[in-house]
Amino acid sequence: MAAPCSLVCCGEESDSEKAVIGIDKVLFMFLLLTVRFSNGNVKNAEKLDFTMYKNADESNPRKKSKRIMVAESDRLCYVGNNFGAGSLKCNNLCKYYVGVLNRQTMQMEVHSAQLFNMQPVIPGDATETAKPQDTTQTYRDKVDSLIEAFGTNKQKRALSSRRLNQVGSDTLHQAVAKAANTVIDQKGLEALQQEVDETEVQGDLALHLPPCNAGADKPENVYLFDDLLSPVEFGALEQAGSKMAALTSEELKKMRDEAGCLCVVKHLQNMPSVGEARDKVARCAFYLSMLLKLARQRSITRKFGQEEGCPRIIQSKLLRTFTVETFNNGRVQNIVSSSMRSKLAAYALALLLHMNRMTGDLTLLHRDLGITEARMVEVAKSMGLTLIKQARAKAFEAESQDTNKHASLVLPLVKYDQFIERRKRKKMH
């Protein structure tokens, strides 16, 4: 019959006094020095050296409980710890106790214990360490990594498409950079800067010129009449043109004094007496009067041109082509900006060329449009027109001579050298 024994419960122990148990590859009780291997029994347990290491930072509550157990023999070394990826989670879920039997008093003391998962360590075999997080990754890179791991098929296809587009964009940038370097080597940096300056000067006007066919064989085909007024729009001006042709001399004088349409009055006074030419000049004169009226206004309403009997199709064309839509007080408004005034000047000048045998009066036109003469000359130069300079007359002929500036369309078109104005700095006294 086995001898009876009694259990003695020890008081609360510190972490350094707790018993330690190793399991899996090595199962031992530190106090009894009993070791058990999964693949057999140890013949000479005295040749095993057990060492336990603890964290030196006792003030840190997270680190002071960390322990490392090492079992060394002549052939192999086992290591276990109670923290990290290889530790057992059961130590946090429940408590373990070890009974130590004193054979002399036949009393078994119960001590608190921890379980250690002992793993064999082969000399020369590098242990896996946790990869540090890449701090160079952007937020987009992290999101892409999540999509690759956990994204849906649709998200993965979108990610693949975006990466392919990014590769294509990078290739395009490299090709453009290579081409730019080649052009710089061929032309030189100074020549390219001069071309850029000329392009910037012409940029604002070039966007607002009528469609131009510089390679046309006739002056009439450079700025086509159909690009200014389509056949449908020209046909809609029949009634308005008839009223314009029927104006009396008193009405023409009133128009010149009040409306400021000097170009229109001049062509109505000198238009042909009969035939299709008279009808064309009358219709073009009405359309030109609408252009001049539009240039003198700032804000345009939908009722523009109704008093003059402007057809609906012409009104829509004017609002669509020569105004800019803006939002003011919750409503959409059509305004005529400075760039649109330049566009009106170019289209009005092109229309005058068809009305007067490819010649236009710049002086009268800039007065009707309300822009400076220098701006009008700049528009004529950008259109490639030839400026006509009047010869100086004698004293008795000066009063009767026409001193206005004119522009004529002559093939080939003139390419003017751009003059970049540089303002002089004021001297400080």
Image (spheres, helix red, strand yellow):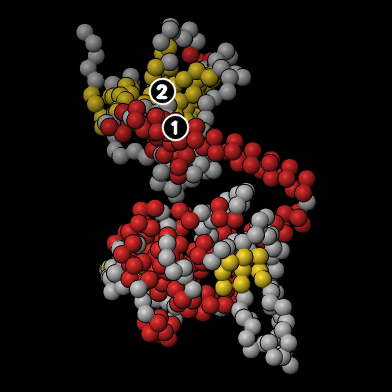
Question: Circle 1 is placed at which residue position?
Answer: 161
- Answer few, some or many: residues within 10 Å of disc 1's Cα (few below 14, many 20 plus, some between 14 and 19): few
- Circles 1 and 2: CB atoms closer than 8 Å: no
Is 192 left or right of 270, judged from the image as shown? right
Is 240 left or right of 362, judged from the image as shown? left
Disc 1 is placed on an element classified as: helix
Mark toward the viewer: 1 or 2 = 1
Number of marks in the image? 2
Question: Circle 2 is placed at which residue position?
Answer: 117
Tell me where residue 78 appears, x and y as whole percent.
50, 20
Can see residue 273?
A: yes
Depth order, front residue of 159/106:
159
Residue found at x 51% / y 41%:
137
N-terminal of the pair, mark 1 or mark 2, is: 2
Residue found at x 69% / y 74%:
389
Question: Please, what is the three-letter code of the amino acid marked with disc 1?
Answer: Ser
Q: CA distance from mark 1 to mark 2?
A: 47 Å
